[in-house]
Amino acid sequence: MEYLFLNLLLLPLVWMIFLGLSFFARLQLSERFLSESVKFLAMIMSLMSLLLSAMVVMNGFEPLVLDYADWIHVGEYDFKIRFIIDFLGVTYALLSSLLIGIIFRFSRNYLHKEEGYFRFIFLLSTLLFALQVISFGRALDIIFFGWELVGTTSVLLISYFYTNSQPVRHSFRAIVSYRFCDMGILAAAAWAHHYMHTTDFNEMSRLLHDPHLHTAGHGGQIALFFVGLFIVWASLAKSGQLPFSSWLPAAMEGPTPSSAIFYGALSIHLGPFLLLRFYDYFHHFPLLLWIIGLIGALSALYATAVGRTRSDAKTMLAYATISQVGIIWVEIALGFTHFAIFHMVAHASLRTWQFLRSSSLIQDFFENPVVHQHETIQRNLSVEKMVSKNLRKKIFLHALHGFHLDYFTQRSLDGLSWPMRAYISFEKKWMNLNNSIATSIFKKR
């Protein structure tokens, strides 16, 4: 099992390194070679993931814990490379391999003869490696490494058409949201190292039962509570949950395959995945589960209301995804962890198909056997009909403006980008001053 896991982890890493070296060596890899290679890579990884999943099932769902060489060793403290092979990890790894394989195959026609095809393949290969690291990582430090790779590839694919200004602006909004919430993982790791001397989520959950850990000298329950709160904070942006929901519909500027795999399937579910990893830790703090459930419920209601006011297919799917992920958060808060895993797999598979078919929506409509017939499709009773008409109008009027969440997000971005704008303005003035001085000296001569 360990040998199969190492191959599953190293295969995309070797392929990624090969693509990087070929770029710096200025090797012109043909589109056909890239397409066939990634198709073969996805097939092999899917088979290995399936075999690893079967081994976990035959082992009675007993997790296999793996420890490798120390990265840092100072006195009695050591920082090991730690992995775990369990049901949650192999499920997400198998889902990642299968769906990315589908995206590779779809992109062969969708991005045929695109100038950035090599860049797309490289970024998606990096995503595949990062998801394997996150799936099997057993410590916050390891998960953070893969977490950052996913965020970087996401931002670069949002700005895939970088010659247009709009995708670049939206990628900037995404990276600000990512970085703001990524501080949650760093804060959780720092506090866990300080108070528990480990970031291994298995050991963290076990140490909560240690009576010596709850003394005032170790920070007490409040410090341990904040470790879990930082984990919840870190999960917000990737999941598109409130108040970090407005960047996700803007991320639809990227190619449809990347929108499908990131914001319909895999990246969007990393938030619930992280919550499931630390569910045993949250179980000791019921208030954290209440916070998770409240955020998920509010995000689901917000995305449902706003999504019904949007007219383009990809934006509607983006809000529908936020809504479903919010429901998964509620399921985790209620303790339905196995159902949440099933919901993640089913939802990711459905959204991938819907995003890939979004560009063919009109064709699908006319191919519907009900169209051109004298048959009316009646809508079922929805929750909105239980609300009075006046209140419904007010809700949807605010929903048209996204409940003004974009306004506050834009103001925050303007505040964060102020130092950059000030520096650019200063640089322009400095260059103009230098040019004027140089011109006056040249005239005197």
Image (cartoon, grey):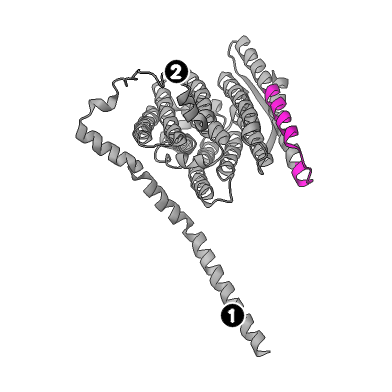
x 33%, y 19%: residue: 376
Mark 1 → mark 2, Cα distance in angstroms: 73 Å
Residue 107, quarter of the rendered image: top right
Q: Give x and y (percent) for residue 390.
A: 20, 35
Secondary-structure class at tag 1: helix
Residue type (three-letter) at the residue carrying disc 1: Ser
| Residue 424 visible in the displayed image | yes
* Location of residue 59 by image quarter: top right
Count of residue discs: 2
Q: Which residue is mark 1?
A: 436
Residue 369 bears which disc, if any?
2
Q: Is residue 204 visible?
A: no
The residue mark sitting in front, 1 or 2, is 2
Location of residue 300 in the rendering, given as x and y in whole percent from the top left corner: 37, 30
Q: Give the residue type at disc 2.
A: Pro
Residue range in magenta is 21-45
Q: Is residue 12 left or right of residue 200?
A: right
Instruction: Decide which of tag 1 and tag 2 comes sooner along the chain.
Output: 2
Magenta segment includes 44: yes
Q: Nearer the viewer, residue 260 or 151?
A: 260
Does the magenta stretch mainly form a helix, a strand or a loop? helix
For label 2, the SS is loop
The C terminus is located in which quarter?
bottom right
Q: Is residue 257 left or right of residue 19?
A: left
Q: Residue at x 67, y 27 (%)?
A: 67
